[in-house]
Amino acid sequence: MVSLNDKLLKQARQYLVGGVNSPVRSFNYIGLEPILIEKGKGSKIYDYDGKEYIDYVLSWGPLILGHSHPKVINELKRAMALGLSFGMTNKHEIDLAKEIKKAISFIDKIRFVNSGTEAVMTAVRLSRAYTKRDKILKFENAYHGHTDYLLAKAGSGLATLNIPSSLGVPKDFTNHTIVAPFGNRDAFENIFRKYGNRIGAVLVEPVGGNFGVVLPDINFLKFLRKFTKKYNSLLIFDEIITGFRFGYGSAAQQFGIEPDLICLGKIIGGGLPIGAVGGKDNVMNLLAPKDNVYQAGTFSGNPVVMQAGITTLKILEKEKDRYRKLFELTEFLSKNIQNAAKLASVALRINYFGSMFSIKFTNKKYFGMAYKYLLENGVFIAPSEFEANFISFSHTKRDIEKTIKLFRESLNKIGDL
Ligand code: PLP
């Protein structure tokens, strides 16, 4: 019998570039055929042949509650019954903004957009307008979306595909982008001594999620806050992955730092496409129509998307004690994989923080072998060592134990080679 998955994969290749709509989905990094997913429930996803996988990708981060949370789905049905899109202000937008503001107190105003890429693009535009300076500083291997001028030494998909930057980005477009090594104060100070009065913003992920999980260096983040203030540059926290990931609110607040602007996405849309920029009135009010920083979007503030976000955040707030369980499960999984690797004499490193983890083998070939074994046996982790994996409120100890068992078996096989 021809597998429906294989049939659809063939068609995907015929009609979609590379069979996908975002490069990492192609599994190019590990040289395997991608899986196609029909549905998801809780911690599991299912391909078109009905094969079940424990899902640690979770749509690349948004689904902190797991797939198809019944309350989110029900509230969405109610919102959809009222109409899908109006392109006009609606109560759902107000409610989601209220919910976010309640959780992240330094925000005065919010602008909703449709993706993380757009959120960062808007934050950078705002900071350039506010400071009247053109240059921005980002860190090596940090990914902030696929905006032209930010595709300089970006991690994640680009690291996966070994593209140093992207074709189609004119050199002139990255002229104002300065890339600094993360955590290196001397390098940072040198750059600021040279260009400080021309740098409008420093853009940083408080916990790196696009070059594997990069553990936070809170002292360095505090140093960035102090230094940007001294030079009157804005500090932008890209919390598209980290927002509402480690607790009900921002990583910024948890680390005791107040950035000038925060970019959110993923979790705040509950699984539907979203991005948001938030900050104090003096910066945010530069946006049109209040002022002249232009930004617009047909689908921005879409009521259905907003409702997915509101319901998700409300559940997170109500069940915020459960974050701790996520962290415990992540630690349990990570430590057990690391131990199994040690016992099997396979060199790998697991980075984990909160409910995020990433696995980097010293030998890439071994990652591919372990990956294949996991996938065949029903565990789906990110098909690249540079992507973060996530654990949701729906993952159970049983899911984690099964994953550890499969990891152990695969590592023992590799160790026996
Ligand atoms: N910023 C960070 C830190 C991200 O991880 C991502 C996407 O993974 C983005 C920005 C871009 O978000 P989107 O893919 O929604 O455009």
Image (cartoon, rainbow, N blue to C red):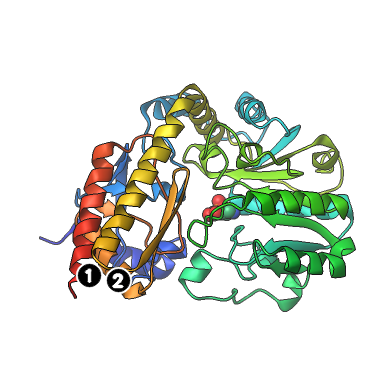
Q: The disc labelled 1 sits on which kind of residue?
A: Ile
Q: Position of residue 356 (x, y in %)?
A: 45, 48
Front position in the image: 185 or 283: 185
Residue at image position (84%, 62%) is: 134
Side of 107 where 21 appears, left or right: left
Q: Quadrant location of the C terminus?
A: bottom left
The reply to whether discs 2 and 1 touch (Cβ–Cβ < 8 Å) is yes
Residue 176 lies in what quarter of the image?
bottom right
- Mark 1 residue crowding within 10 angstroms, few (<14) / some (14–19) / many (20+): some
Residue bearing the label numbered 2: 366
Side of 416 where 67 appears, left or right: right
Q: Which element is circle 2 on?
A: helix
Q: Is mark 1 within 8 Å of ligand 1?
A: no
Q: Position of residue 63 (x, y in %)?
A: 43, 41
Residue bearing the label numbered 1: 414
Residue at image position (42%, 48%) is: 59
Q: Position of residue 288 (x, y in %)?
A: 81, 43
- Mark 2 residue crowding within 10 angstroms, few (<14) / some (14–19) / many (20+): many
179 in relation to 246, above or below: below
Residue at image position (26%, 58%) is: 340
294 in relation to 96, above or below: below
